[in-house]
Amino acid sequence: MEKRKNVTGEEGMKTQAFYGQVELDVIRAMKRPGVFYWIALGASILAFGGGMTLWGYQVLKGMGVAGITHPVGWGVYITNFVFWVGIAHSGTLISAVLFLFRARFRSAFNRIAEAMTVIAVMTAGLFPLIHLGRVWRFYYLLPYPNQRMLWVNFRSPLIWDVFAVSTYLTVSVIFFYVGMVPDFAAARRHFTGIRRRIYSILSLGWEGTTDQWRHYSRLYMFLAAFATPLVVSVHSVVSWDFAMSIVPGWHSTIFAPYFVAGAIFSGTAMVITLTIPMRKVLKLEKYITVDHYEKIAGVLLVTALIVSFSYIVEILMAAYSGNIFEKTVFYYRMTGDYKYFFWLMMFCNVVMPLTLFNRKLRRNIKYLFVFSLFVNIGMWLERFIIIVTSLGREYIPYSWGTYTPSLIEIGITVGSFGMFFTFFLIFSKVLPMLSISEIKEQGVGNETI
Amino acid sequence: MRPLEIKGVPKIIQVLAAAFLVGAVDFLSAERSDGSMLIALLFWACVGQGIIALSAAAEVASGKWIKNIRPYLLDYYPYLAIFPIVFLVYSRHITIYAWNTGEGYWWSPSFFIIRNTAALLFPLIMARYYARSLEKESPRIKLFAGLYLLSFVISQSFMAFEIVMSLEYPWVNTLFGGFFFVESLYAGIAFSVLLAGLFKRRDVECFFPAFKDLTVMIMGFALMWAGLFYSQYLVIWYGNIPEEVSYIAERMHIPAIKNMGLYTLLSLFLVPFLGLISRKMKADARVVSAAALSVLSGLMVERIIYIVPAVQINIIPAALPLAILGIPYLYSMIVQYMSLSSPPVEN
Amino acid sequence: MKQFEFDTQEEFIAKLKEIVDAGVKSEFITTLTPFHVHEVDHIFKTRPSELRYFTLLGAAAGFILSFMFMVFTVMDWPIITGGKPLISIPAFIIVAFECTILFGGIVSLLGFLHLNRLPDIRRIIDPRECGNKFLIIHDMGGGK
């Protein structure tokens, strides 16, 4: 027995030191913000505020200040909507889907990914309202018994959107919060005063008894199991906003898996864009390692291949079918007014990801950061091209036209990025950014894969 | 696991015999039964390519569960040679295609036959490299697995768009190629779980993880199949464009075909998904095998639904090739099962 | 009341096994751990969590209620849009699916809070801190 005590004594100290260190590292990230943080936060708030001001201007003056008009009635606002919903999806993929696959490398990213999901869905949800123009009429979309004696049209993809995105927001917030309850309990130990009280309340008095953990594990698994079909269904519903029409270039059965793969692709790139500077600044390199990035780059590669396959099928089917309307739209995409955007998109989404076949590049953090920026641009352009070129060559040639985003629209787009980064920076100081209990569970020396 | 050497009839003889018999049935059958052979070709190409694709996908994703069953799955790769040969035999029916006027460069019959035979031959070549690299335990095995997957995607897309979709001109369905290769993977999973369930009876522990994970995968693919099916149905139904919706209308208005459609929904989604929800069912090899058989039968019926309004199908010329092409697979399954009487040595 | 504190998971499980083997019933034992230790469930031989009933109830309610609601709205204001039938199942499935997940998630959360008796006001004000240690607390004699 004595011999056992000795060994466990050392083991015990190492284990306790590890647990303590995890908490300290994560909590330290929540404490004193440095200069970089304030600069970044200031720039984000500036952009966010600017965007909100421009939106206010648009509400005052009317939708004419935006560039959307006949025939292109959907422009940058809808592009941003689809873009941000796409970003949200990969967060859920990393936290929920990889949980169900028991992929351990997810524990380094999953809290950040969930936060990204929640903030991105909030940002995305704003855009249909911005696009609405008369925002005060938004309640038309809600199905409640009203004095107008009207009901919403449940056969419309726009209503499916309302249900899909609000369900996604609700379930993501629940999933995010539930994951943090034990970590709030850990965090309250390290703060005093009002911050301690807030974390205590948020932790709901969590103790960590057997029964609590038992129900918690089940809840987490069920929420992950619910979030998983949401990843596929919500972006499928968003893609059906387009596919349900009979606009050439939009009415295509491949849209659902194409958009879902594209969402995961762009969102994973955004995870990389966010976490690489963050781990440097907050000194979390021990927890988010190169091995993790290699696996995430693998996800990027697979989804890039699916997206490339979809591009090829769409273009070849346009030629294959002999349908003159489809052929016109795709020819316009490749050689028309927006051809530079199209070929830049092809380069960013099809050609560049092929470099990820090289293992050294997958493990090169600097390369992954630059690469992820290209992918973000490429995927934004993809949504823009799909929407604008199809609408620009829609029905009869008399009504063909082009679209130029106005300064208001560009400003609001920049504002949405400002909103996203503002909330993300605030989150990173206020909430625990790594999943403390999961990392502890994985054990000493296993904090990497 | 040692790579397996199956004793018995050499694979090349099986391949040639099967192809010859199918050809014989086709030549001896009535003049207008062009679709009968197509069902057999489509179904067994789906299963055959799917088995190898499953192994390759797990290889690329570094899935540990497949390690022990992989050599058994890769043993089926020579049968991929059947399909180009059967396609060549089928190609005498090329007159059923509406575009067969010989105009244009792409739509010339001879080019059609050449490119589709090549598309069916390509996976065989890649599977051979993959199987060889497994035997030699080459470090480049992931590369060959990836190349097989590329050839698999191309081959299934060609099968879907060229052989099946062009029967129904002017119907275009961009998801059809993707749907075919997901169905092929699904068929591969169903077949593999039949194999794993069979091996489980010998109580050899090294196959248990494969069986467990394949069961979960059946459920996942049931959902994925339902999702992709729904995507296609919803878009075509909602758009209501005459050239697209006529495809569905033809198949919903004939009661026999509509019932077949309901059967596919049942057997490809409801039965595997609902039947395997409870943990007890997932552990029972008989239930899981029943689900796998339901999946395979559903896929077979689905091939019929794809082509039936456009071609003539007579029962004997349809059933015989289906059975004939299945015999090599059944034979190999039995031989592999018998070879397990002495538990294999684990690496 | 006896309280045991451990630094590592392994020591904790070994001691817990000892206590349970010595005859102390699981209802009288409380353990506090910094993360979920699955072996504890095996040792206590707990039944699977009752949360699954809440989840099933919520999901089924979401599906049925949403379908009922949609059919009601379309019968209440029967206007044909886009040439689609009034009760168009393919379109309704999507909203029903989303509502299934929505209700399932919310009811699961409520069930979790109910089963764990959270929020626990007493513990919010005065948390029982165990740090990162593994605790066993039991109040029956007969154990070691």
Image (cartoon, rainbow, N blue to C red):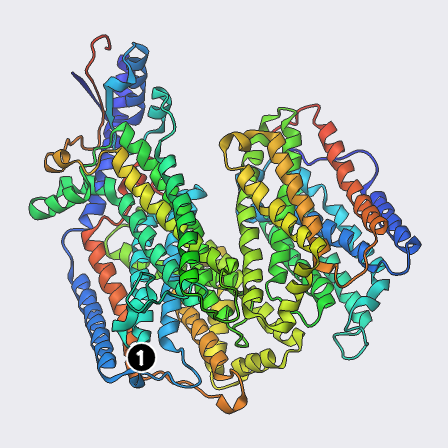
Name the residue: 59% across, 63% down. Answer: B175
In depth, the one of A294 and B139 nearer the eye is A294
Residue situated furthest bottom in the rendering: A398
Which of the image's four quarters has the N terminus of chain A?
A: top left
Query: Is A284 situated above or below A350?
Result: above
Q: Callout 1 environment at 10 Å: few (<14), some (14 to 19), or many (20+)?
A: many
Question: Where residue B120 sits: x, y (%)?
Answer: 74, 58
Question: Where residue B265 sits: x, y (%)?
Answer: 61, 49
In this image, C74 relative to A176: left or right?
A: right
In this image, C83 relative to B36: left or right?
A: left
The quadrant in which residue A321 appears is bottom right
> Looking at the picture, which amino acid does disc 1 mark?
Glu
Name the residue: 79% across, 62% down. Answer: B311
- Residue A133 is at least partly visible in this image: yes
Residue situated furthest left in the rendering: A193
Question: Where residue B68 sits: x, y (%)?
Answer: 61, 35
Question: Where residue C1 sits: x, y (%)?
Answer: 16, 16
Name the residue: 28% across, 72% down. Answer: A137
Numbered marks: total:
1
Query: Is A19 situated above or below B249?
Result: above
In depth, the one of A280 and C40 nearer the eye is C40
Residue beneath disc 1 = A409
Residue situated furthest right in the rendering: B28
The quadrant in which residue A18 appears is top left
Tag 1, which chain? Answer: A
Residue situated furthest top in the rendering: C142
In depth, the one of B7 and B52 nearer the eye is B52
Which of the image's four quarters has the C terminus of chain A?
A: top left
Provide the secondary structure element on which disc 1 rests: helix
